[in-house]
Image: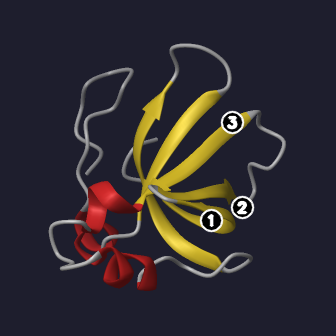
Amino acid sequence: MPGQRVQAKILSHHPWGAVVQIVGFENAGLSASIDMIQQFSRTTSSYDELLALFPPIGSQIDAVIEQIHRWRPPVSVRLSIRPDDLESLAWRCDFCGERSR
């Protein structure tokens, strides 16, 4: 559900962000990622500064479900690790349209 806090394990880095695995949903048939450029490009002054924000591969971090796309398998989940989102993310549910918080 968008707005739900989860634990995520960083699997790999890419120029745009990271592919992760949501802890507890390893066999759920979904893909998950963190778009670091979308989340932090406005607050960083260089790509090197942005790269320094990437969580290390293999680490387990707190995250918040930002979006869920169910258009075709596998389900795709976008996570946020922005501090403000971890505190108070409010997002509309893809199913019912209500705010998550």
Q: Earlier in the sequence, mark 3 or mark 2?
A: 2
Query: Which residue: 21% across, 78% down?
Result: 44
Residue 78 higher or lower than 50, as above or below: above
Left or right: 50, with 45 as reference point: right
Q: So how many labels did they put on this image?
A: 3
Give the Cα separation between the discs numbered 3 and 1: 13 Å
Q: Amino acid at mark 1?
A: Ala
Residue reaching furthest to the right: 27
Q: Nearer the viewer, residue 37 or 69?
A: 37
Left or right: 16, with 93 as reference point: right
What percent of the width, then of the height, locates residue 19? 62, 55
Q: Nearer the viewer, residue 51 or 8?
A: 51
What percent of the width, then of the height, locates residue 10? 66, 68
Residue 11 higher or lower than 100, as above or below: below
Q: Nearer the viewer, residue 99 or 8?
A: 8
Q: Amino acid at mark 2?
A: Val
Q: Which residue is mark 1?
A: 8
Q: Nearer the viewer, residue 98 or 18?
A: 18
Q: Amino acid at mark 3?
A: Leu
Query: Which residue: 36% across, 25% down?
Result: 94
Q: Earlier in the sequence, mark 3 or mark 1?
A: 1
Secondary structure under tag 3 reads: strand
Left or right: 21, with 86 as reference point: right
**CA neighbours of label 3 inside 10 A, class few (<14), some (14 to 19), many (20+):** some
For the residues labelled 1 and 2, say whether their Cβ atoms are less than 8 Å apart: yes
What percent of the width, then of the height, locates residue 40? 27, 68
Q: Earlier in the sequence, mark 1 or mark 2?
A: 1
Residue reaching furthest to the top: 72
Q: Which residue is mark 2?
A: 23
Q: Which residue is mark 3?
A: 30
Give the Cα separation between the discs numbered 1 and 2: 5 Å
